[in-house]
Image (tube, rainbow, N blue to C red):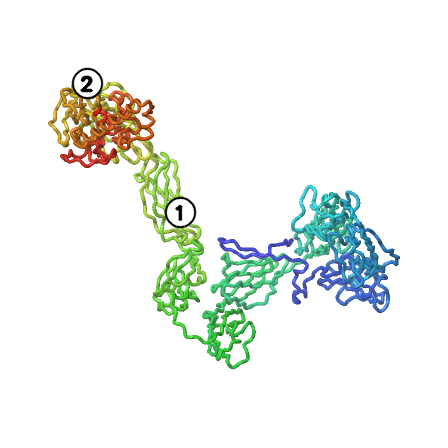
């Protein structure tokens, strides 16, 4: 049996019954327990535990110690080889071996030289189960040779030239560290211009006069022997030149345009470029076809050296350094190849097998070039080692089959290439051992609640035992998912709770036997400071008391210690410590600071601190009032399945008594972070018995309330997970509706997580036909809200029920609801459709209901489609949009409103269900009787004369029947707004023009005009017009629109003020004519129009129209042609407004204001006024003033 590597921890999955905690232990070289009782009869091959490094450089001034330690049973014996041959220690008096160990000590301090013992050493540890070997340890003494003496000539050069000062240190072991200093042992300053290369030389990109000195000294420090060697000083003299000729960069090192660098994997790759030039060049680095690794790249020596740590094969490639100054740039490419000494991919691991088992040793390594794998057995190449029938070598793997005790041995894997080697020992130990538990029996573990508990079960056995943990005297297997298994057999309870207390049994089994051990676990309450010391401000000379109230497990005895500023309290009688308090009397200034209360038990400790501030005496402040401080020290006790007792400690009430406490809960399992109201208790209580629901992970918090408000919430209590139970309720809103004719969709409102009462919430969905004898069909579905039953007949009633269940059990029997499978379109149209025409705009429709079975769904109602087919008046067919009326439910009649009179209609009726409409009934045609017509489309008064007016109109847009005649009514309106006698005139229906004669001149008339059919008279249209004043063709004032109030008509020709005005105007014109005549007779030219334009008479200016012409006149004909309303008797515009700029003589002139009121049909609102008194005129803008233009025309 092979023991494979396991992860450090293995979490147990939930839901297994029973869940056994199985444990496998990895037995490696160091994993075989070195228990004295166990080792009495347990054998183990040797294992090298400590050895000197492969490249072992020694200090020749000290004794040589070559380490080799190993373990095994029986204890191994040791032997050495030197340079491949046996090293006989007993023959060399300077060499001794440490007892019970293979470590060699060579005493060269008394006599002998280190060089004598230089060589390659290898240690072998051997017992009856095999032999383990160490690495080849190359022992070499450290060397720090002196510099060869040489005569160094002074160096003289001009300012700006480049310079290299060579160091060339002696070769030492290990190589020395190079640095440059002066005679005073001060390091020479370096910069971008002056720097030391990797080879130790000092490079000057260009020299300056201040570089002149005689003590450039190169030092070599040999760390192994702690010695420093010094080169002869070098003298440099820089001569100032008159002109320093600038030059582009050239490389001092490396030479040429390209070079090659090879480095081993894992080492530090260092690339160097140093350039000379004037000004001093700057160095840049790039990697061709790649980027420099960000976290492993560093620049040294003013960016002249590029270093990449932990170099790998991926870092191979071409690196380019660029030296640049203002005169140019040069490039050097360094080709980097990364090789690799062997490194492990999988080193062989020890095998502990029982007889007859199989196993394998795997040895995999990589490198560049690829390493060669070779195997040894007990230190002997496997090709010449004793044959073992259970062993088969396959390259880097040794396969063992059906091993026996003689198969035990130590195998070595050697992976080597030209850059190094790896050597690993791995034993195969064939043992037949029953399980042994090494942990002491009845060990007692004490752990603080909510902390991890670790129960040990150290074991051994071959074959590898399996481990099971049990709890309790009855040996019930652990089933919860809160345990963690460690590879050494330890059982971990990550968060120990009170119910974790008990006896735990560890059982180890293999085919050779069984062993068990009991340990005991006690869970203690955590020590808590429930009343912490509070910040205090005390007057000098006063007394302060800090309270520190501790709550602890009753089996643990705490010790209370007070500290000041993290140190002991002063040894002063003013400091008094009792059980819960620290009192400081007669406080001094230096008593201020931080005071800490520390409570210690054997298992835990807690602390709390407060600051003391000492101030000068001040008056006592008035008390402050605020909401309470939050409660604290929440504790859950009496924990039952459906109840728990919560207790707490109230916070400071801040001088306002607490009236009540509010308790809230959080369900961390289903609604983490959401707090719900639980209950309220009196402010005198500090405990509450809370009712709980199953399978809820409760946390509680408490808030205090006083007259000023509610406190902040307390800290949440510990969590309490109630046990799971079957659901208490079933889903609500259960419905059964089909989405297709052959299915039944059952839907419901799922339970929320709080209502589930346990894990594994599911639903049992059951259904059967209501009118059949079938048994219930049931299916259990996951936590969803819908299930579709396929293959059902169309629209059949079903009985449905949905029951909740979880891993514990079923909810109570659910209620049965009725649903229907899917609907289809109705098959039959309503019959016996009848139409009863009520009047010209309303009809009543009757029909017979369709059979319920043919509806094939829920009856939604009946729908009537109707449309107008033909107009009786014009007898031409027009396509109109169909209208639809829907009548809900099972009604068999309905009214069709809004019909057009004297029209042909067609209709049909359809039944409607949830799926849609059924077929249409046969069309039924009906005709509406005549109705009254609408008002004539228009009415115009044209060609007014002294005694006649001509009326033109358009027929009604909706005649609603056959027109029989028109009725025209009219009456005069006198100047006092009184209406004259009404004249009634019948006009044939085929007329659209009519002339009224024998009318009074200069008189306003109001007309009422409407059409008639056999059904009666229609709506009327009104209009007003005025006959002419005389035969001179002067147009009358503008005729106002229908619906306007009749204006007051005043004959201005009879007004005294008007006669006087006209006389004044005539006199003025006569005077002007006389003056013109006199000036003309004197021979002067008088440009009348220019003078009039330049010196217009203010009395005459207002008589002009808006367009500037003098008394411009437009006839009725021209007005009609121009379509300009309200000009000299024309109709009002369509918007029924009168604009002053369009005419100086309009309805405004006859009314009392400009705000006329009109109905929609053009009828006038209001009544005619009998007022005769005229309001005084206000110039041209007055609505009472007559038009000056008309007055002037009348005068002329």
In which quarter of the view is residue 154 placed? Answer: bottom right
Please tell me the numbered disc located at residue 724: none
Please name which of the two marks, 2 or 1, marks the residue nearer to the observer: 2
Residue 763 visible in the current orientation: yes
Please tell me the numbered disc located at residue 763: 1
Q: Earlier in the sequence, mark 2 or mark 1?
A: 1
**Callout 2 secondary element:** loop
State the residue in front, 366 or 1085.
Answer: 1085
Q: Position of residue 994 (x, y in %)?
A: 18, 19
Vertically, is 597 above or below 1156? Answer: below
Vertically, is 887 above or below 670? Answer: above
**Callout 1 secondary element:** strand
Q: Residue furthest front?
A: 1082
State the residue in front, 1022 or 741.
Answer: 1022
**Can you identify the residue that label 2 sits on?**
991
Residue 850 visible in the current orientation: no
State the residue in front, 3 or 1125.
Answer: 1125
Q: Position of residue 129 (x, y in %)?
A: 73, 59
Q: Is residue 1050 left or right of residue 798?
A: left
Vertically, is 1194 above or below 544? Answer: above
């Amino acid at each position: 049996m092979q023991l494979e590597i396991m992860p450090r921890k293995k979490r147990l999955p939930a839901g297994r019954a029973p869940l056994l905690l199985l444990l496998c232990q990895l037995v490696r070289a160091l994993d075989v327990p070195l228990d004295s009782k166990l080792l009495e009869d347990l054998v183990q091959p040797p294992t090298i535990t400590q050895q000197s490094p492969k490249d072992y450089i020694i200090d020749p001034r000290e004794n040589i110690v070559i380490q080799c330690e190993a373990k095994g049973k029986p204890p191994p014996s040791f032997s050495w080889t030197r340079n491949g041959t046996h090293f006989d220690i007993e023959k060399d008096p300077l060499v001794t071996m440490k007892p019970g160990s293979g470590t060699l000590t060579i005493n060269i301090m008394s006599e002998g030289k280190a060089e004598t013992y230089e060589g390659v050493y290898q240690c072998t540890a051997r017992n009856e189960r095999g032999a383990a070997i160490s690495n080849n340890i190359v022992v070499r003494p450290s060397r720090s040779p002196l510099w060869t003496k040489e005569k160094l000539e002074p160096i003289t050069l001009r300012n700006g030239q480049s310079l290299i000062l060579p160091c060339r240190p002696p070769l030492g072991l290990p190589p020395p560290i190079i640095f440059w200093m002066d005679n005073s042992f001060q390091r020479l300053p370096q910069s971008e211009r002056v720097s030391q290369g990797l080879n130790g030389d000092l490079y000057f990109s260009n020299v300056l006069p201040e570089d002149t000195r005689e003590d450039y000294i190169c030092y070599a420090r040999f760390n192994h022997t702690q010695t420093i060697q010094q080169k002869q000083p070098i003298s440099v003299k820089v001569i100032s030149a008159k002109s320093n000729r600038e030059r582009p960069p050239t490389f001092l090192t490396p030479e040429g345009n390209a070079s090659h660098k090879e480095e081993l994997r894992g080492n530090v790759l260092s690339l160097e470029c140093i350039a000379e030039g004037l000004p001093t060049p700057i160095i840049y680095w790039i990697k061709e076809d790649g980027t420099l690794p960000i976290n492993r790249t560093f620049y040294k020596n003013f960016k002249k050296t590029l270093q990449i740590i932990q170099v790998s094969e991926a870092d191979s490639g071409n690196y380019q350094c660029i030296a640049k100054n203002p005169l140019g740039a040069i490039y050097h490419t360094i080709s980097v190849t990364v090789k690799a000494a062997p490194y492990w991919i999988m080193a062989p691991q020890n095998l502990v097998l029982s007889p007859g088992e199989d196993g394998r040793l795997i040895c995999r390594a990589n490198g560049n070039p690829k390493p060669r794998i070779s195997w040894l057995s007990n230190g002997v190449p496997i090709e010449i080692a004793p044959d073992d029938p259970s062993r088969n070598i396959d390259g880097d793997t040794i396969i063992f089959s059906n091993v026996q005790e003689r198969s035990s041995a130590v195998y070595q894997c050697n992976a080597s290439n030209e850059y190094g080697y790896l050597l690993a020992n791995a034993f195969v130990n064939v043992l037949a051992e029953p399980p042994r538990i090494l942990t002491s029996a009845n060990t007692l573990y004490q752990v603080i609640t909510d902390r991890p508990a670790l129960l040990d079960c150290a074991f051994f056995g071959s074959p590898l035992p399996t481990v099971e943990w049990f709890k309790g005297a009855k040996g019930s297997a652990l089933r919860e998912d809160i345990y963690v298994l460690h590879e050494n057999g330890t059982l971990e309870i990550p968060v120990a709770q009170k119910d974790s207390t008990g006896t735990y049994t560890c059982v180890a089994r293999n085919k050779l036997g069984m062993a068990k051990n009991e340990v005991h676990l006690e869970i203690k309450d955590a020590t808590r400071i429930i009343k912490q010391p509070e910040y205090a401000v005390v007057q000098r000379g006063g007394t302060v008391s800090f309270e520190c109230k501790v709550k602890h497990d009753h089996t643990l005895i705490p010790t209370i210690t007070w500290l000041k500023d993290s140190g002991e309290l002063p040894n002063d009688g003013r400091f008094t410590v009792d059980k819960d308090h620290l009192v400081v009397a007669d406080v001094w200034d230096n008593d201020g600071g931080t005071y800490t209360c520390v409570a210690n038990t054997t298992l835990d400790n807690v602390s709390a601190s407060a600051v003391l501030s000492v101030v000068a005496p001040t008056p006592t402040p008035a008390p402050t009032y605020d909401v309470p401080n939050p409660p604290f020290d929440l504790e859950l006790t009496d924990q039952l399945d459906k109840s728990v007792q919560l207790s707490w400690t109230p916070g400071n009430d801040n001088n306002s008594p607490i009236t009540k406490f509010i308790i809230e809960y959080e369900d961390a399992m289903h609604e983490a972070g959401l707090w719900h109201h639980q209950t309220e208790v009196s402010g005198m209580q500090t405990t509450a018995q809370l009712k709980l629901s199953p399978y809820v992970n409760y946390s509680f918090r408490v808030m205090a309330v006083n007259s000023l408000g509610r406190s902040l919430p307390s800290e949440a209590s510990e969590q309490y997970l109630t046990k799971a139970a079957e659901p208490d309720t079933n889903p609500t809103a259960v419905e059964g509706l089909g989405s297709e004719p052959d299915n039944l969709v059952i839907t419901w409102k799922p339970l929320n997580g709080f209502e589930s009462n346990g894990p594994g919430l599911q639903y049992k969905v059951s259904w059967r036909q209501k009118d059949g004898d079938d048994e219930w069909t049931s299916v259990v579905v996951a936590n969803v809200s819908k299930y579709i039953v396929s293959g059902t007949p169309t629209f059949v009633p079903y009985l449905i029920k949905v029951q909740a269940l979880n891993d514990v059990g079923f909810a109570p029997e659910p209620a049965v609801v009725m649903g229907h499978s899917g609907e289809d379109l109705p098959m039959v149209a309503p019959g016996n459709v009848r139409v009863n025409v009520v009047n010209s705009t309303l009809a009543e429709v009757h029909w017979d209901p369709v059979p319920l079975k043919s509806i094939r769904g829920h009856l939604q109602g009946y729908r009537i489609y109707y449309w107008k087919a033909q107009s009786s008046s014009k007898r031409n067919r027009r396509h109109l949009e169909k209208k639809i009326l829907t009548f809900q439910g099972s009604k068999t009649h309905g009214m069709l409103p809004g019909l057009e009179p004297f029209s042909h209609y067609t209709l049909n009726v359809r039944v409607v269900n949830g799926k849609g409409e059924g077929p249409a009934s046969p069309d039924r045609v009906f005709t509406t009787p005549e109705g009254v017509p609408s008002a004539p489309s228009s009415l115009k008064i044209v060609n007014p004369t002294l005694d006649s007016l001509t009326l033109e109109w358009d027929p009604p847009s909706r005649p609603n029947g056959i027109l029989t005649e028109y009725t025209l009514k009219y009456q005069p309106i006198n100047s006092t707004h009184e209406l004259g006698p009404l004249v009634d005139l019948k006009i044939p229906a085929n007329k659209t023009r009519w002339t009224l004669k024998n009318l009074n001149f200069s008189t306003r008339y109001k007309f009422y005009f409407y059409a008639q059919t056999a059904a009666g008279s229609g709506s009327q249209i009104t209009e007003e017009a005025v006959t002419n004043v005389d035969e001179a063709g002067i147009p009358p004032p503008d005729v106002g629109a229908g619906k306007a109030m009749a204006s007051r008509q005043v004959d201005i020709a009879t007004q005294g003020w008007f006669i006087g005005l006209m006389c004044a105007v005539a006199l003025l014109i006569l005077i002007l004519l006389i003056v013109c005549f006199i000036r003309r007779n004197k021979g002067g030219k008088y440009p009348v129009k220019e003078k009039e334009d330049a010196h217009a008479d203010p009395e005459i200016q207002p008589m002009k129209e808006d367009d500037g012409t003098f008394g411009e006149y437009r006839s009725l004909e021209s007005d009609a042609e121009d379509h300009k309303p309200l000009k000299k008797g024309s109709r009002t515009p369509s918007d029924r407004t009168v604009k002053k700029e369009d005419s100086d003589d309009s309805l405004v002139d006859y009314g009392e204001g400009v705000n006329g009121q009109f109905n929609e049909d053009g009828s006038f609102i209001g009544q005619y006024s009998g007022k005769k008194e005229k309001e005084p005129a206000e110039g041209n803008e007055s609505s009472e003033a007559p038009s000056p233009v008309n007055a002037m025309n009348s005068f002329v």
